[in-house]
Image: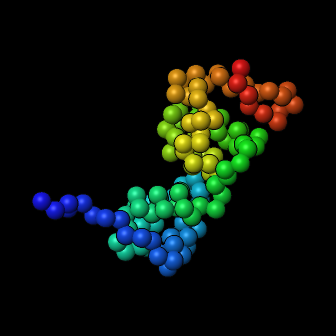
Amino acid sequence: MADRRKRPRPWTASEDALLREAVAQHDCTNIDWQEVATHLEGRTNKDCRKRWVYALRSVVNKGPWVQDEDRRLKAGVELHGCKWSKVSEVVCTRQADRKIERFPSAAQTNHAYWQNAQEDGTSVLTPT
């Protein structure tokens, strides 16, 4: 019997441009992927989100974490717990799997694992 699963078709440059335009109409913390998908015929909200997150998003940082990212990570975990896709929306500069590596205690819901390492309010987060 033939495999009936749909094979993903490659993204075109024009689809990438349409996706960029559609996403630009949203705040990075509140992208309505259902609405974005309406701009791309034949693409689902999941297709659009995956393409954006893993290929097109220009703010994905793969280098060392900076203080502001740590602050946003802590706030995101306090707000959403272990829902890493939601935490990603708060941090905006890292993929969800990078947050899991950075914040290992969240899997055990031990949010006290991170503490403010500086008393001057600059909030460098370090393991206790």
Estimate the x, y position of residue 103 in percent, counting from the top left: 61, 32
Which residue is found at the position 53% from the left and 36% from the top?
80
Q: Residue furthest front?
A: 1
Task: Tell me if residue 35 can be seen.
Answer: no
Q: Is residue 54 above or below residue 106?
A: below
Residue 105: % across, % down: 58, 25
- From this viewpoint, which residue is outermost toward the bottom? 14
71 vs 16, left or right, is right
Residue 2 on image: x %, y %? 16, 62
Q: Total label count? A: 0
Q: Which residue is rendered at x = 64% and y = 21% of the image?
A: 112
- In the picture as drawn, the residue positioned furthest to the right comes out as 120
Give the quadrant of the N terminus: bottom left
Rendering coords of residue 110 (x, y %): 58, 22
Picture quadrant where residue 9 is located: bottom left
* Residue at the (66%, 58%) spot, across then down: 59
Residue 125 appears in the figure: yes
Q: Nearer the viewer, residue 121 or 113?
A: 113
84 vs 92, left or right, is left
